[in-house]
Image (tube, grey):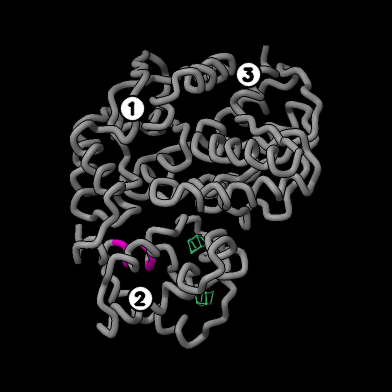
């Protein structure tokens, strides 16, 4: 299918160039660290105009700057334009014109040849009643996957797991248009559940990709957990500590799943304290959009800023429900502990459920 090209967004880009309101810049996690206009969405819109009008020719550093975007969508939440589509179309333009970051090329090649982004350490086929798409990250984390499956089973949700290949989010997000079509074909040929009425997922990024790029009827498993806990009142013990919840960008801002994780925390007897940036305006953990692959130091600084949000509200634990956010924030919490002498633990909501259901 022919995708929109950068010039198709000319009207949006010119609107931004004329307005230059800068609302997108206020909370952009990348801009906050880099403090350089081109890293903000407003700055990228100027680059877009230069590319459309051919007053700018692509060059290596331009491609690198475009790769320094988390695709977190916070700019789009504060703007009336198609910001994410524009940024990804600029990335596609760069790849088409021969500029791409080697680490992204390697990852794309790996997905095309092996079917997965990461080292697969568990291939958990199992019979069950409702299909579950596991995703590359959980397939590389046997303990975390076993915990989530155990929680689901204890709540009478019986997942069926079969063969699958990568959903291809990172291929699409980094601008490899043609390759993404091949990855889509690969998944369609491997995955047997394209006709299923509902498919559970564990990773927010897989969830949005399967929904938007494949049209599949997906539901993040944590939503199913909230529904079961609502029906089965009183089956969890109270954990009783103060925690804050970090909304993963794809699950929260993009899929609208805000209430269910918070309901679960209430069931677990956790005193939920909100960070300043929460729900629709939550800030990214630093792990999105392929930034971690091209600039791990930037990713870490962004994650540290998110952990600082939690430190400011004085909680013992940050919990979240994304296999990328959790390790990204935990690494930052460890670094900050060394710098500030204050440690906030980061725990998956699956781990909290596992403790409370025993
Ligand atoms: S991208 Fe949107 S919010 Fe940012 S300067 Fe342009 S019009 Fe304003
Ligand atoms: S998507 Fe996120 S990181 Fe990228 S420009 Fe917008 S706010 Fe900044």
> What is the quadrant of the N terminus in the image?
bottom left
Which residue is pictured at 42% across the width and 63% down the height?
A: 84
Q: Residue 143, how many percent across, how many down?
A: 49, 18
Number of numbered discs visible in the structure rendering: 3
Which residue is pictured at 72% across the width and 45% down the height?
A: 310
User: Sequence-wise, which precedes: disc 3 or disc 2?
Assistant: 2
Q: Residue 88, how many percent across, how many down?
A: 35, 61
Q: Residue 161, how many percent across, how many down?
A: 36, 21
Which residue is pictured at 79% across the width and 46% down the height?
A: 313
Task: Look at discs 3 and 2 and give the one toward the viewer.
Answer: 2
Which residue bears the numbered disc 2? 48
User: Do the residues under discs 1 and 2 have CB atoms within 8 angstroms?
Assistant: no
Circle 2 SS class: helix
- Quarter of the view holding residue 350: top right
Depth check, front residue: 293 or 358: 293
What numbered label is drawn on residue 354? 3
**Label 3 lies in ligand 2 vicinity (Cβ under 8 Å):** no
Which residue bears the numbered disc 1? 119
């Amino acid at each position: 299918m022919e995708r929109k090209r950068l010039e198709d967004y000319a009207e949006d880009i010119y609107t931004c160039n004329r307005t230059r309101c800068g609302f997108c810049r206020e909370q952009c996690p990348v801009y906050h660290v880099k403090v350089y206009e081109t890293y903000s969405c407003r700055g990228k819109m100027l680059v877009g105009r230069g590319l459309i009008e051919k007053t700018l020719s692509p060059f290596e550093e331009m491609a690198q700057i475009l790769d320094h975007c988390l695709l977190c969508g916070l700019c789009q939440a504060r703007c009336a334009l198609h910001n994410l589509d524009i940024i990804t179309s600029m990335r596609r333009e760069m790849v088409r014109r021969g500029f791409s970051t080697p680490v992204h090329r390697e990852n794309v090649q790996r997905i095309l040849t092996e079917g997965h982004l990461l080292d697969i350490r568990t291939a958990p086929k199992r019979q069950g009643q409702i299909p579950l798409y596991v995703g590359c990250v959980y397939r590389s984390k046997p303990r975390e996957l076993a915990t989530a499956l155990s929680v689901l089973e204890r709540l009478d949700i019986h997942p069926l797991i079969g063969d699958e290949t990568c959903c291809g989010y990172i291929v699409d997000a980094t601008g490899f248009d043609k390759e993404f079509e091949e990855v889509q074909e690969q998944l369609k040929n491997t995955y047997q559940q394209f006709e299923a009425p509902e498919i559970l997922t564990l990773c927010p990024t897989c969830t949005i990709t399967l929904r938007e790029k494949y049209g599949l009827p997906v539901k993040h498993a944590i939503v199913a957990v909230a529904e079961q806990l609502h029906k089965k009142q009183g089956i969890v013990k109270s954990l009783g500590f103060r925690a804050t919840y970090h909304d993963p960008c794809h699950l929260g801002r993009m899929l609208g799943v805000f209430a269910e994780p918070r309901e679960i925390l209430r069931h677990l007897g956790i005193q939920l304290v909100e960070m300043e940036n929460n729900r629709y305006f939550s800030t990214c953990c630093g792990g999105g959009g392929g930034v971690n692959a091209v600039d791990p130091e930037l990713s870490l600084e962004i994650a540290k800023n998110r952990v600082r949000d939690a430190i400011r509200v004085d909680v013992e634990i940050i919990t979240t429900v994304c296999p990328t956010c959790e390790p990204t924030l935990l690494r930052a919490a460890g670094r900050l502990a060394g710098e500030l002498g204050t440690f906030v633990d980061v725990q998956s909501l699956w781990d909290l459920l596992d403790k409370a259901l025993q």
